Amino acid sequence: MIEISLKQLPNQEFSIALENSRYVIRVVETNTMMAITIIKDDVTLIENARFLPNDFILRSNLVDPDSGNFMMLVQDDSLPDWNSFGVTQFLQYINSDELGAL
């Protein structure tokens, strides 16, 4: 797994190279929770989806067999909250080999 650093900010966007692809990740605070958008090589995979703890972010039909998936690891099962990013909540990328081993 690769930990992807999130800043303790309510709204952020950044790009990262993972497994020969370029991802743009946008995390925003909504009225009740955090939402995430993931774009891979200029194709939007998921947009403004609820950001849930300890679960895969991309639905299985959106995951290319040669790509991985993302998960927000949360130590206390609380909803993702920007105040806890990098403290008790960590965005992880699980590569294709690791997914195959699960």
Image (spheres, helix red, strand yellow):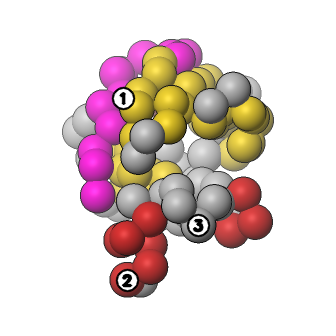
Would you say residue 11 sits in the magenta stretch? yes
Q: Secondary structure at mark 3?
A: loop
Considering only vertical position in the picture, is 30 above or below 12? below
At label 2, counting other C-alpha atoms closer than 10 Å, the crowd grade (few under 14, some 14-19, many 20 or more) is few
Please identify, in this view, whether the residue under mark 1 or under mark 3 is nearer the observer.
3
Pick out the residue farthest to the left.
Answer: 87
In three-dimensional space, the C-alpha distance between marks 1 and 2, rounded to whole angstroms, equals 26 Å
Please identify, in this view, whether the residue under mark 2 or under mark 3 is nearer the observer.
3
Residue drawn at the location 33% of the way across and 37% of the way down = 4
Quadrant in the picture for the C terminus: bottom left
At label 1, counting other C-alpha atoms closer than 10 Å, the crowd grade (few under 14, some 14-19, many 20 or more) is some
Considering only vertical position in the picture, is 42 above or below 56? above
In the foreground, 39 or 33: 39
Name the residue tied to disc 2: 101
Q: Are marks 1 and 2 in contact (CB under 8 Å)?
A: no
Q: Identify the disc placed on residue 6.
A: 1
Q: Secondary structure at mark 2?
A: helix
Q: Which residues are magenta?
A: 1-13
At label 3, counting other C-alpha atoms closer than 10 Å, the crowd grade (few under 14, some 14-19, many 20 or more) is few
Q: Secondary structure at mark 1?
A: loop
Q: Identify the disc placed on residue 65.
A: 3
Residue drawn at the location 41% of the way across and 28% of the way down = 16
Q: Are marks 2 and 3 in contact (CB under 8 Å)?
A: no
Q: Residue 49: x percent and y percent? A: 73, 42
Q: Is residue 24 left or right of residue 97?
A: right
Count of picture labels: 3
Residue drawn at the location 37% of the way across and 50% of the way down = 92
Instruction: Please state which amino acid type lies under the numbered disc 1.
Output: Leu
Q: Is residue 94 left or right of residue 31?
A: left
| Image quadrant assignment for residue 85 | top left
Residue drawn at the location 29% of the way across and 58% of the way down = 1
Instruction: Please state which amino acid type lies under the numbered disc 3.
Output: Pro
